[in-house]
Image (tube, helix red, strand yellow):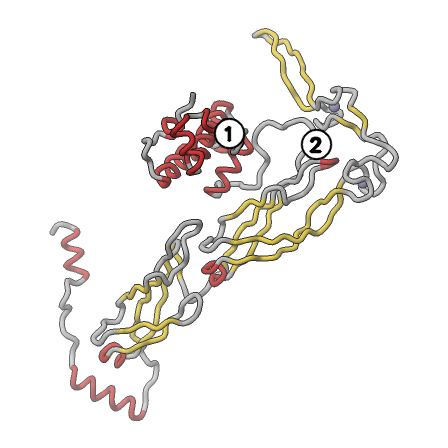
Amino acid sequence: MADFYAVLGVPRDASDDDIKKSYRRLAMQWHPDRNGGAKEAEEKFKTITEAYDVLRDPQKRAAFDRYGEAGLRGGGQQQYEHVDLSDALNTFMRDFGGFGDLFGGQAGGRRSGPRAGADVKLPLPLTLAEVATGVEKTVVLKVLEACDKCEGSGAESGTKPQTCNTCGGAGEVRRAQRSFFGQFVSVAPCPTCAGEGVVVSSPCKKCRGEGRARAERTLKVQVPAGVATGQYMTLRGSGNVGPRGGTRGDVLVVFEVEDDERFERDGEDLFCEALVTYSQLVFGADIRVPGVLGDLSLRVPAGTQSGTVFQLRGRGLPRVNATGTGDLHVKVQLWTPQAVEGEEASVIERLGALQGQAPPQREKGFWSKMKEALGA
Ligand SMILES: [Zn+2]
Ligand SMILES: [Zn+2]
């Protein structure tokens, strides 16, 4: 019996975060895309994903803690099955966004029968304000739908697809091959029916036997708050239908957050600058600063140095799929007028005469810190 804790190398009282981290590290190591599809890597990847899938779910984890693996099967309440490779890949993509070529070929063994449709990649532009609140978007997608004439079978009306003679409907063929090391058997998709198990002898005229046609599909996408460019979510079973009755592929919604020139973003934290006048720094002032969802007020205390950074707690972006919100860091910068004249010029001239030279740095300056760092 598998000990899922040992599989992930975490103690039994590991936090959700520990479990996630450990899984992620192992998954990056054993992901089939990183191991050239090696069989042991696939097996390892499935095993760790299965463990992760149980331990990340509080209900399944509790059942496993009490009864072990048997606790996951019994009851019939929560159907538990060993994951296959595509489930495992989907779990990893769902929680970690995968890496590298998301939209490359499908990994793992092909099953016989109707082939599943291809995934559809859907770029979804978002504003920073939409990221802050989360948003429901309605999108229109070009996909392949089942042909209405033949209802997806690919066969002309009045006819039916026939069981393939080459493979007898199994969709795969076995070949015994002799080699220097002896005889071995290989299994390959049937060349006649391409693994589908059936052949269409009189194809539907509308779809030429393909069983599907181009169409538009309207989808609602619930975008969670806090997402970033490059992250994506998988809408399982919303993509193209497969040829001749194949199931639908997925839609991968890829987020593209538009640049907002007012802010720099680092995860859930935002950074911005606010210009202030000299008198505002000297006497203090309430100033307006940009916030994602509208301007905010910031109290600049009297005697503030230019370059000071103020932290507005909870005014950043929400953490994606977690609780808590980041901060907004506002750097106040002294605004220097480019040209002054008249009274403004004379007041500043007078001020210059009164102040003379700025005092030497009171705090430890750049050079002394640098010397300290160098151990001088
Ligand atoms: Zn058709
Ligand atoms: Zn066949």
Q: Is residue 279 left or right of residue 267?
A: left
Please give the name of the residue rendered at 78% of the width and 36% of the height, measured from the top-left corner: 153
Q: Which residue is mark 2?
A: 114
Residue neighbourhood size for the residue with mark 1, other residues' Cα within 10 Å, grouped as few (<14), some (14–19), many (≥20): few
Q: Earlier in the sequence, mark 1 or mark 2?
A: 1
Q: Position of residue 26 (x, y in %)?
A: 40, 32
Please give the name of the residue rendered at 29% of the width and 89% of the height, measured from the top-left corner: 344
Q: CA distance from mark 1 to mark 2?
A: 33 Å
Query: Which quarter is ligand 1 in?
Result: top right
Look at the numbered disc 2 and give the secondary structure of its residue: loop
Q: Position of residue 333 (x, y in %)?
A: 30, 71
Amino acid carrying mark 2 in the image:
Pro
Look at the numbered disc 1 and give the secondary structure of its residue: loop
In the image, residue 350 sits, relative to residue 141, either above or below, namely: below
Which quarter of the picture shows residue 311? Answer: bottom left
Amino acid carrying mark 1 in the image:
Gly
Assign the N terminus to one quadrant of the image.
top left
